[in-house]
């Protein structure tokens, strides 16, 4: 295999197109969807001392891991810590760093495609479509998505290093390590390396492949251990792995729809538990069987791009399939951060095949440019939505009518702006949408605080009594209920709750320096 000789302007065009597409990120602030507690007010990452570094790299206790997002991602945490230390609490500066990292990531993946397909339209157009794809807006504009961007960058560098003729084993292993501790789903890198060997039609580079596999296996063991500590592993969707697999077939089909612009984007998606006999499951199964058959047919004719694209799509999504490890989140745009490369390569290969005829050869550049422009405009619009929290959470409220995230986040924005009536209605809606969930608890607590602040003590008391029944093991709910009881003049009942708080949650009382029978205060 000869190293690809691509025109230098290809990298420049890619970088400019990517930066312009996601430029709205530079004008965004903190979105509030994990940005607040994970980045803006994180008690570990905001500290500029060596003790914070020790917590990032060496502490595995529940409190530390939970504070850092419930995962062991020292590369992501170090990047945020360094950004804090150098740039301070500037959302715009942090967004600039994240966008720059994303541009570098797209350039790395362009190198991968050039190594696999040579200096062809499939490589250049595939890289451009991948870079400006709207599915990346969540990872690029959402500051808590730093882990996705870093994982994309280091995964691309690992695959690019492997795709070279010499396949530098230490480089591949190092980039695999950095990717796996940027985001856990990067443990599939060894499988991506094998797909490169398949696409190039060469024998695997055993030393580099083995080094990557060993690193990925070790990282997987760490991630599983930490997941057990913080309880990130959920029950299988529908109660069994068969139901989870059936349901996720439909989700994977929806991911294809997102990849080819045929499915609406959202921050959160509604996912149903479906049995194998469901018509939607059978339809999704038929779709993937047909795609596999078409890829095999193309492979027999010497065209490997389609099989490569399908392989990248499925391999990159395997860790979030809910079958290997059931996760709390079932579907998200950010899960496509690598996987969408596959469909874009296939789409580029289709265009190259259609425009390969002599009569159409002169149209290759204008048609490709028009396609990139259309996708880029879609990506730009998606980035603008993410940069505007009100627009984003209005969309989420409408597109996920059974999920509480949209109304809850929108209520907090409106409350901060002083629109208390609208905020109250949205808190109530969020609480009613997903009873028993963390967002519902937060919405109920904020609703009680809002009512209390308006002097509507009986209504606040009713809210906190309901919260107490729904969340009996939450010290914050118990604390706030006791304070509202005192405001209502029910001192004996308040005292009983305060004593229970001291008995059951002494650490909570100590950390907040709470008096045993303190004065009435607004709920926190």
Image (tube, rainbow, N blue to C red):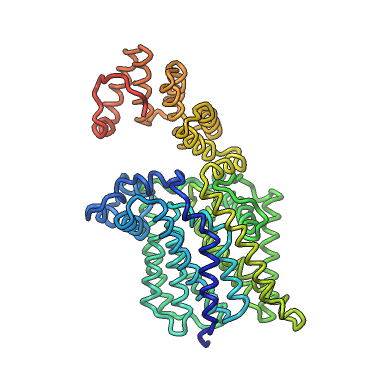
Residue 225 location, x and y as percent?
36, 54
Residue 360 location, x and y as percent?
75, 79
Between 478 and 423, the one lying in front of the other is 423
Question: Outermost residue toward the bottom?
Answer: 2
* Residue for point 68% across, 64% down: 289
**Residue 437 in sight here:** no
Is residue 173 rendered to the left or right of residue 103? left
Residue 476 location, x and y as percent?
36, 30
Is residue 90 rendered to the left or right of residue 17? left
**Residue 280 in sight here:** yes
Residue 408 location, x and y as percent?
50, 36
Question: Outermost residue toward the right?
Answer: 359
Between 461 and 128, the one lying in front of the other is 128
Q: Quadrant of residue 361?
A: bottom right
Is residue 459 rendered to the left or right of residue 396? left
* Residue for point 42% across, 53% down: 92
Is residue 483 rendered to the left or right of residue 337? left
* Residue for point 48% across, 37% down: 413
Between 262 and 500, the one lying in front of the other is 262
Query: Does 462 appear above or below 125?
Result: above
* Residue for point 29% across, 49% down: 44
Q: Quadrant of the C terminus?
A: top left
Q: Quadrant of residue 198?
A: bottom right
Between 290 and 445, the one lying in front of the other is 445
Question: Outermost residue toward the left?
Answer: 50
């Amino acid at each position: 295999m000869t190293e690809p000789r691509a025109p230098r302007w290809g990298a420049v065009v890619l970088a400019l197109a990517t930066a312009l597409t996601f430029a709205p990120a530079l004008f965004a602030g903190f979105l509030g969807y994990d940005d607040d507690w994970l980045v803006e007010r994180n008690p570990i990452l905001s500290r500029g001392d060596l003790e914070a570094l020790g917590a990032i790299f060496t502490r595995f206790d529940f409190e530390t891991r939970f504070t850092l997002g419930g995962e062991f991602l020292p590369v992501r945490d170090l990047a945020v810590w360094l950004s804090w230390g150098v740039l301070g609490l500037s959302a715009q500066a942090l967004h600039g760093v994240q966008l720059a990292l994303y541009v570098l990531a797209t350039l790395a993946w362009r190198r991968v495609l050039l190594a696999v397909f040579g200096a062809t339209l499939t490589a250049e157009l595939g890289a451009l479509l991948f870079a400006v794809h709207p599915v990346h807006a969540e990872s690029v504009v959402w500051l808590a998505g730093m882990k996705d961007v870093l994982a994309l960058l280091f995964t691309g560098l690992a695959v690019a290093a492997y795709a070279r003729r010499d396949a530098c084993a230490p480089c591949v292993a190092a980039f695999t390590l950095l990717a796996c501790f940027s985001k856990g789903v990067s443990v599939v890198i060894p499988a991506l390396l094998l797909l490169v060997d398949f696409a190039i039609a060469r024998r695997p580079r055993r030393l580099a492949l083995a080094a990557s596999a060993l690193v990925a296996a070790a990282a997987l063991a760490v991630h599983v251990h930490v997941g057990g500590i913080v309880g990130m592993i959920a029950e299988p969707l529908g109660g069994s792995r068969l139901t989870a697999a059936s349901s996720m077939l439909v989700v994977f089909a929806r991911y294809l729809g997102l990849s080819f612009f045929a499915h609406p984007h959202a921050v959160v998606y509604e996912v149903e538990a479906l049995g194998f006999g469901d018509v939607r499951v059978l339809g999704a199964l038929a779709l993937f069987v047909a795609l596999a058959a078409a890829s095999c047919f193309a492979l027999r004719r010497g065209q490997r791009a389609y099989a490569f694209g399908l392989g990248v799509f499925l391999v990159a999504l395997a860790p979030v399939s809910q079958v290997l490890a059931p996760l709390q989140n079932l579907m998200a745009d950010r899960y496509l951060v690598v996987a969408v490369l596959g469909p874009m390569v296939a789409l580029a290969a289709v265009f190259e095949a259609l425009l390969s005829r002599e009569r159409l050869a002169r149209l290759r550049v204008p048609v490709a440019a028009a396609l990139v422009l259309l996708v880029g405009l879609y990506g730009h619009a998606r980035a603008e939505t993410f940069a505007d929290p009100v627009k984003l959470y209005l969309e989420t409220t409408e597109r996920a009518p059974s999920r509480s995230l949209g109304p809850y986040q929108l209520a907090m924005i409106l409350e901060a702006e002083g629109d208390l009536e609208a905020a109250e209605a949205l808190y109530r809606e969020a609480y009613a949408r997903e009873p028993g969930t963390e967002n519902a608890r937060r919405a109920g607590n904020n609703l009680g605080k809002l009512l209390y602040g308006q002097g509507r003590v009986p209504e606040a008391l009713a809210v906190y009594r309901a919260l107490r029944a729904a969340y009996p093991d939450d010290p914050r709910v118990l604390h706030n209920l006791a304070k509202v009881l005192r405001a209502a003049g029910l001192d004996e009942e308040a005292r009983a709750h305060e004593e229970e708080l001291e008995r059951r949650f002494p650490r909570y009382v100590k950390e907040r320096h709470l008096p045993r029978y303190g004065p009435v205060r607004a709920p926190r």
